[in-house]
Amino acid sequence: MKKLSGVIILLMLLFTACGIEKEKEKEKEIEKLEYKGATNNYKYNLVIPQILNVQSEDISYFNLSLQENARLIIDELLESTGEIKPSVPYEAEMSYEVKENDFGITSIVVKRYTYTGGAHGNTTLETYNLLDKDLKLINFESFFNDNAQSYFEMKINDAIENKERVKNINGEEVIFFENPEVNIKNAVIYFEGDSVKFVFPLYDLAPYSSGMPVFKFSKDEIKKYMK
């Protein structure tokens, strides 16, 4: 009878532990935080992600740095229109996407657009990649080994030289500069499906009209370069 009671208690503890683990998995939420404002001189609509219900030093950094970035954008917008009245209102937008993937990583892409006069505005991407198992942010150096940089740069150079069809973040074909200098550290990285993607900024490898080029590598292809 004592043995039976012990087994029952053990099973109850196991089920309780499983229940707690499942609850933990459900606890992590990504919620949007919005900042909106408009006058005759400017308008802004900033939507940023905030990770809730789980805590780590990197998550605190992520949440606070995005809030600070949004405040800085607003401050710069107000300051730049404080003494002038632009013919076209200045503008700032932020949005984000969470990319589903098979790497056990929460991959978040933050897109920023600003217009402060001139022929066109400027678009930039920031990416944040958080390991689900320990809630730590990763970057190129912490995820890939020492041989990865030369491999990726070689493959990207080959794609450009061979005039392979490369698309930008909007799905449009990219026309590259002649003999661009590829530095993988200039790109942002995110994970989607079973692939890792590198996005290069405007003007880095191609003219403004070609947008931001995206280079994709499958999980199988990069396994030997992962730490």
Image (cartoon, rainbow, N blue to C red):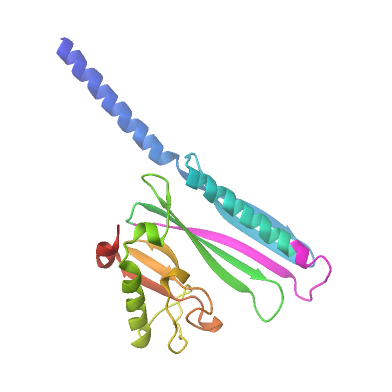
The residue sitting at 61% across, 51% down in the picture is 67
Q: Is residue 198 magenta?
A: no
Which of the pair 9/57 is nearer the observer?
57
> In the image, is residue 140 above or below residue 183?
above
Q: Quadrant of residue 71?
A: bottom right
Location of residue 191 in the rendering, given as x and y in whole percent from the top left corner: 38, 61
**Residue furthest toward the front?**
146
Which of the pair 152/141 is nearer the observer?
141
Location of residue 181 in the rendering, given as x and y in whole percent from the top left corner: 44, 81
Whether residue 50 appears in this view of the structure is: no
Location of residue 139 in the rendering, given as x and y in whole percent from the top left corner: 42, 59
Q: Quarter holding the C terminus?
A: bottom left
The residue sitting at 51% across, 73% down in the picture is 201
> In the image, is residue 206 above or below residue 73?
below
Magenta part of the protein: which range?
A: 78-101
Whether residue 52 appears in this view of the structure is: yes
Q: Is residue 93 magenta?
A: yes
Number of numbered discs: 0
Location of residue 36 in the rendering, given as x and y in whole percent from the top left corner: 69, 56
> In the image, is residue 120 above or below residue 59?
below
**Residue furthest toward the top?**
1
The residue sitting at 26% across, 62% down in the picture is 223
Q: Quarter holding the N terminus?
A: top left
The residue sitting at 28% across, 65% down in the picture is 222
* Left or right, 161 with reference to 67: left
> In the image, is residue 70 above or below residue 181?
above
* Left or right, 224 with reference to 91: left
